[in-house]
Amino acid sequence: MGLLIPWSATLAMVDIYSIFVGCHLRLPGVMVIVVLGDWSLSILSLAAACAAAGVVDFLIHTNGPYCPPKFCGRYQVSAAMAFLSWVLTALSFLVNLWLMASL
């Protein structure tokens, strides 16, 4: 998940730069790099979200002091946010794939 923030920030800066300068970034080579980056980060994000959900499920259903009630809710929210991040990254991949196909 640590790769997702720099990737998204870099894409946002490149988009803002292209808007201010007025250059056209819908080149096939650039779009292939963006689509492959979004695809790989989407797969990694799904793996991280599933791992987080598995750990949270294990901590909640274990009969022991592994998960204090104060932290169980936080763990569940972080797993839900990981799945939300995956959905948004997968959506970005699909949109960029559609844009690449329209070139």
Image (tube, rainbow, N blue to C red):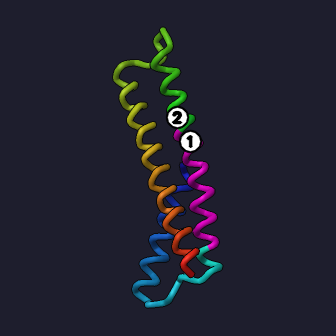
Q: Residue at x 36, y 28 (%)?
A: 73
Name the quarter where the C terminus is drawn.
bottom right
Report how far apart the C-alphas of labels 1 and 2 lie in the structure.
Answer: 6 Å
Query: Vertical placement of 17 versus 49: above or below?
Result: below
Query: Vertical placement of 75 versus 87: above or below?
Result: above
Q: Which mark is residue 48?
A: 1
Look at label 1 and name its amino acid.
Ala
Tell me the crowding category of disc 1: few under 14, some 14 to 19, or many 20 or more residues within 10 angstroms, Cα based.
some
Q: Position of residue 51 (x, y in %)?
A: 57, 35
Query: Vertical placement of 73 versus 26: above or below?
Result: above
Of residue 67 and residue 44, the one placed in the foreground of this image is 44
Q: Residue at x 63, y 71 (%)?
A: 33
Q: Position of residue 11 (x, y in %)?
A: 50, 70
Of residue 36 and residue 67, the one placed in the foreground of this image is 36
Residue ID for mark 2: 52
Which of the 4 quarters of the picture holds residue 71?
top left
Label total for image: 2
Which of the 4 quarters of the picture holds residue 7?
bottom right
Look at label 2 and name its amino acid.
Ala
Q: Secondary structure at mark 2?
A: helix
Q: Which mark is residue 6?
A: none
Q: Which residues are magenta?
A: 32-49
